[in-house]
Amino acid sequence: MENYLWKSSKDLIKNSNLNKFEKFVSKKYRKKFKKNYIKLWNWSIENLGDFWSSIWFFFKIKGKIGEKNFIKSKIFYKNKFLYDYKLNYTENLLKKNNNSKAITFISENGYKEYRSWKELNNNTIKLSNWLKKIGINKRDRIAAYLPNCIETVEAYLSTVSIGAIWSSCSPDFGTNGTIERFSQINPKVLFVIDKYFYNGKEINVLQRSKQIIKEIPSIKYLVIVNYPGQKININQINLKNIKIYNWKNILSNKIKKNKYKLFDFDHPLSILYSSGTTGKPKCICHRTGGVLLQHIKEHSLHCNIKPNDNVFYFTTCGWMMWNWLVGVLAVNASIVLFDGFPMYKNNSLLFDIVDKEKITLLGISAKYIDVLNKNRINIKNKFKLSSLKTICSTGSPLSVDGFNYIYNNIKKNIHVASISGGTDIISCFVLGNIFKPVIAGEIQDKGLGMDVDIFDESGKAIKNKKGELVCKKPFPSMPLKFWNDKNDKKFKEAYFSKYKNIWYHGDYAEVKKSGGFIIYGRSDTTLNPGGVRLGTAEIYSEVERFKEIKESIVVGQTWDNDIRIILFIVLNKEFKLSINLIERVKRAIKENASPRHVPAKIISVADIPRTKNGKIVELAVKNIIEGNSIKNKEALSNPEILEQYKNLKELNY
């Protein structure tokens, strides 16, 4: 029998949104599932049109109901869901219009402000009226260079309410990285923050807009947003042929009556970007209806978020989890936005927010959990966390130690929902399941309506073996397209080049006997010593246990007609690399992973390259140590650190 870390109570299952949805489907389609998730999942993938239209009806989506819930195509990505249905995304997120709290903003320095549902509605209408007044039409692109504040949400909702397409970059993206993204989509309007703060440092952003506008001639309007709680910068800018507006002046306009216009289910909603670590970032265009239904399904059925809950996910608006978080408004729950360094002056800052704001679902990264664990921070002795029902973890695989840390040091009675998907689908393939127990190291289940499986190299489904994560049937949050991708060439290459008419996601994973999933890392970073494929996550999970090691990165180096494993480690300040430490690390990996996982070399470095979203970049290190060029250093938050990996004498023997 598996060692369960947590199981739902009978009352929790009975009152869960998933149970209510199951009853709804049972009655509508005369099916009996008896709280058996796999039976419900099987029905969802065998009846795609009925399942996704059931999400529409169960959650009472506002819009025009059509007659065709699924139009089948032989080509995977040309299948159409709810084809003749129409809706407005913003209208479905702003169903509430009262004085209760909709959004809370908190900065790292403790500044806090709120927006009621009524204020959020009014501000969104004022902004959308202004956009229409300056001539913005549907499918025009609106760009935002903003932090994770309420104004960003208002700009987003006003943009998509009139059918324009939203795209955002966080201010921690440098000027060149931002230009590289926005220049591909030719936006007409740029929203920009005047400054932001990170770990106590004030960073001027407004001056960057000069270069951005110079390089992107399509921008005709600049809207300056002042950082919440801060005095207005006096260094305002003047630009030729650009009309400049202040956010507060736009919101000072009188509110006019508003009637939401309905758009096609597949109307473009937003453009997100790939990391750009292997070349120019891909512009991934997402569709309105598919994103709305997928997010509502995940929030309500998989995360059990209920009306009036308060949800806090640590993210920036340069990461898909920001879009996911904003979507929580559609289930009539409130959200909390945090901007800044999550450990500013206080390692447990985020949990202070959980208690003070009565958070019900907290979203964090596996890396954050690892840092708490390394610092031996016992959260449960410092905070009550009485409101907290769910912890979601994403960004990288949550290790067995990570799961155990949460239950031993944060809260015992809590649903830990490790989730995994991607920017490509702006949602999840595998995630939480309130009907099932939590097992350490495993993501509980595949999402409803998502025909997820693990394939070997030949395209055969496998269990209890590592392989490629795939989706065998279409789903409504597939990207609409890549922007500027003639004949869908890059799109097809990204997802359909490995298996015929099957979505290939690029995750190296395994489905266990329990039905749970383990993600071992990205497929393009797997190691192949002696021709045997190994996942990097198994090495990281062992290395993370050493108090001497702050973090690590592992890559394969081509050597002597084979691949050898190289482990780079960043040591905590009080420790030095020793033969004893090297031997202990190798022994732990050998005993707990396998002899094949043992690194040929363990090398100490000062830091590790990572993307703007904090993900480590194995491919960049591999390319550097093998003498290859790095295609896009702008995608990295610390590209200068790559220099230390060049010409290392340890790699020459």
Image (cartoon, helix red, strand yellow):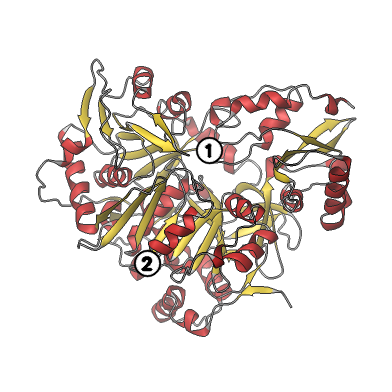
Q: Nearer the viewer, residue 622 or 484?
A: 622
Q: Is residue 63 left or right of residue 509?
A: left
Could you tell me the amino acid type at mark 2?
Asp
Residue 387 appears left or right of 497 = left
Q: Is residue 299 above or below residue 525?
A: below
Tell me which residue sits at (61%, 47%) in the image: 504
> Which amino acid type is marked by label 1?
Phe
Residue marked by disc 2: 309
Quarter of the image that includes the N terminus: bottom right
Q: How many residues crowd mark 2 within 10 Å: few (<14), some (14–19), many (20+)? A: many
Q: Position of residue 263 (x, y in %)?
A: 27, 49
Q: Is residue 121 left or right of residue 367?
A: left
Q: Which residue is mark 1?
A: 491
Residue found at x 66% / y 31%: 620
Q: Residue at x 53, y 38 (%)?
A: 491
Image side of residue 320 versus residue 440, left or right:
left
- Marked residue nearer the N-terminal end (2 or 1): 2
